[in-house]
Amino acid sequence: MSDRKALRWAHSLPAAIALMAPFDLLASLAMDIYLPVVSAMPDALGTSPAIIQLTLSLYMLVLGLGQLIFGPLSDRIGRRPVLLMGALLFTLASFALAACSGGAGFLAWRGVQAIGASAALVATFATVRDVYADTAEGVTLYGLFASMLAFVPALGPILGALIAYALGWRAIFIALGVLGLLAGVRACRDWQETRPPQHGNASPAFARILGNAGFWVHAVGFSAAMGTFFVFFSIAPRVLMGRAGYSPMGFSLAFATVALVMIVTSRFAAWFIGRWGMGGSFLRGLMVMIGGVLVMAMAAMLPPSFATIVLPMWLVAIGIVMVVAVAANGALRDFADASGAAVALYYAVQSLIVATLGTLATLLLPGDTVWPLVAYGLLLPSLSLVGLLMLRRS
């Protein structure tokens, strides 16, 4: 880390993780934690199941699209005010959701909660780009955040079920509000501004970013990694419980092993970079993902089991972390003066690709087999791999 950056961000890596990670966790947790009580919410709020389902879709939509607003805003006014505004909105909305008594109010506050989460996410990742660009610390942070995105969907619904069983559904949102308040108070005290000096540019930031080949190669690689996990998340219950006969708890434990592999792999991310460099790690991560998917495809001839589904997914998970740990650095490298906008586009592109192609894969191919995962896990990594090789040649 340069002296200039150190003056703006006087935190060790463990302290930075403790400061940043809660916002990544809460944005993901708010999406999944109340899934166990969704079926009971229409009666609790006197509304229709369609409205409650809309609260899930609205959160995902606003979380992604909001970043296109807050990215450029953080470039203009700074990371710290955008983050603190996001933390405040998330916290207020979470407490308001706990107090709601009707479907319309619940839907509206759910949108506000997503706005807050979106702002906090953009500011967090833009800060990582400002401070840790092209460093081993940045690789560690990106790998850790990717592991969290895998781990939260596995454990979030379990946590929500336990809270709702013990204290009722409103306690889920009170817990989110309390956690958001704690993270926001600490950020108010410790989060330093990291936005680099603005020198202006003749071309709009979005146009420059979308016209950059390196951005697209790495954004598609990131979409390949996160989308492959999304498709696995979508088909795993039907394959492991519906066909392999796993109990809900057995499924949860098997699923959690994949998240555990990702967390362990993230601990070696800096070693990958030291040995192969950013580009070499990205290349090898894509190849490991493709290799794992091919193993899963060959094993599809056998009855579904832990050995034929989960073990190959461990290999895919290793590749996912290798890709995600360096993809952001590759995509954002040329946009130090507009990293907020670049981060926003990076995650918006990923959300769009995963939501469309990932959903199509699960709808067009049999969802109780591994073929949706095989299709997505071969197509997107291969596209990114071809783009990377073409980029190197040019």
Image: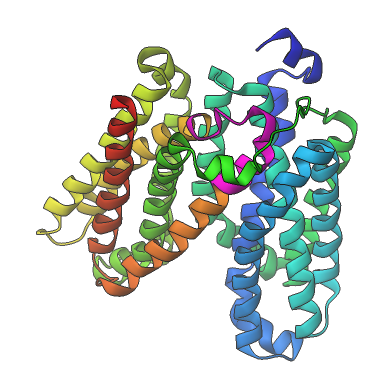
Above-or-below relation of 278 to 79: above
Query: Would you say 333 lies left or right of 117 here?
Result: left
Does the magenta run of residues contain 28? Answer: no
Where in the figure is residue 299, as x and y percent of width and height?
14, 52
Residue nearest the viewer, comparing 156 with 114: 114
What is the x, y in percent for residue 199? 76, 27
Q: Is residue 350 in view from this perspective?
A: yes
Give the side of residue 151 with respect to residue 105, left or right: left
User: Percent position (x, y) of residue 180?
Assistant: 79, 50
- Eyeballing the image, is 300 above or below 22? below
Main SS category, magenta section: helix
- In the figure, 207 relative to 17: above or below? below
The residue sitting at 71% across, 26% down in the picture is 16
Residue 158 pos. (x, y %): 56, 60
Residue range highlighted in magenta: 330-346
Q: Which residue sits at x=75%, y=38%?
A: 75
